[in-house]
Amino acid sequence: MAHGMCGDAVLEASSGGELGGRALVAASAVLDAHAVSADEGELDAGAEPRRRRAGVEMVARREAAACGAAASLDGLPVEVARGLQAGSADPHMLREPGEVAEPWRSSHRGTFSLDRLDPADPEELRLRPFPDLNPSPQTDARREPEAPPSGAPAVSAIEDVVPEETVKRVRRWESRVRACLKAARRGNPSLARQLRPPDLELRACEHTVPGMERWVWDLRPLSRGERAVPLASSSRKVPPATDLDLAAVERLGMDYPDKAIISEMVMGFSDDAVDVEKYVVFSPPHLGALRYAAEARAKVEKDVGKGWSAIVSHLPFWPVRVNPYSIVREERESGVKHRMTIDLSWPRALSLIHI
């Protein structure tokens, strides 16, 4: 047990003399710094004792947490943040369970109301260390993705990959989406909602020309009079389309513990979807995009201008997944802002038409 007087505060630290020595030396340094500041007139008479005590408590808490020991200030235990609990009156989990009146036990205020938080001295909050959240895991780098199978047949027309009847069904769905968007842009979201088609889901194995299902096809060259080609997974040899300086990411990430995320930034994201059956999914825009059609169109055109998106009149890939987008209206102090969202969790099972 190490123990000493620091101004008008008594600091104690158990579990070995090393902790006590470190805590007392550091606390003395904090107090000396505050004393100099007070002598220079930077602190008023009332602020000095509060800063002094907050500094001592901060040091005791930090040193106790680092050494796995218990520390006390004036005989009272020093609280150590154990994590983060959103919505709690004790968000840093400093108290024991049951010691605070949690907002979800009362119907007077909302769970996340700031009025429900325990009051704290501003100086204490300024000096209190935050809990260590989201530590980087130790991971191995991802392996290079496998190249597409060799021996792909020549493809000079979309019907060489997608059966003619399937192409017709997809085009009928696209026609309904275009009619829906036209109504929305004319300022008639109610009609647009009526014209909006349901999601269309196709099993790739049943809607791909036999022998072509081994590849994911890039059909974009067909619009230029060229042959379609198998789509290769992004890798170091085929870098993903990105604004990142991939060489800098790899260089600066050499000592970063999470090697998996660094390799995915360099090679492209992997969803770990192993042995998952391939589906073709077409989803129309959500209702928010129809309600705020002008804002949605402006957002799309902005993305196209930056090279992040492209507007096409033909199937770009097969199999393909068309994710729905929407517009969310947000009211802020600076005004109203419209934000585009892409729903990667869609579709829901009940929204699909299986063909």
Image: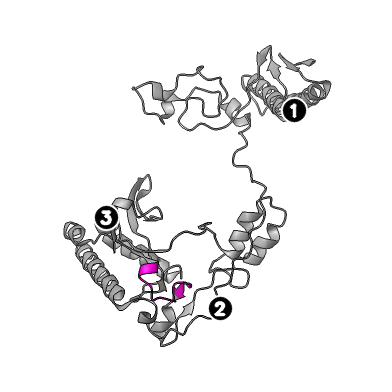
Question: In the displayed structure, does residue 125 sit left or right of residue 347?
Answer: right
Of badges 3 and 2, the one in the foreground is: 2
Q: Compared with residue 250, is residue 209 higher up or lower down, i.e. above or below?
A: below
Image-quadrant location for residue 56: top right
- Residue shown at the point (72%, 30%) measured from the top left: 66
Q: Nearer the viewer, residue 26 or 261?
A: 261
Question: In the displayed structure, does residue 227 sit left or right of residue 18?
Answer: left
Tell which residue pokes out farthest to the top in this image. Answer: 75
Question: In the displayed structure, does residue 196 sit left or right of residue 39?
Answer: left
**CA–CA distance in space, label 2 to label 1:** 58 Å
| Residue to which mark 1 is pinned | 67
| Residue to which mark 2 is pinned | 150
The region drawn magenta spans 205-217
Q: Compared with residue 12, is residue 172 higher up or lower down, i.e. above or below?
A: below
Q: Residue 72: tell me if it is visible.
A: yes
Q: Nearer the viewer, residue 246 or 262?
A: 262
**CA–CA distance in space, label 1 to label 3:** 55 Å
Residue 76 shows which numbered tag? none
Give amino acid for label 1.
Cys
- Residue shown at the point (77%, 24%) measured from the top left: 23
Q: Compared with residue 76, is residue 104 higher up or lower down, i.e. above or below?
A: below
Secondary structure type for disc 1: helix
Q: Nearer the viewer, residue 181 or 239?
A: 239
Tell which residue pokes out farthest to the front in this image. Answer: 210
Image-quadrant location for residue 125: top right
Question: In the displayed structure, does residue 124 sit left or right of residue 104?
Answer: right
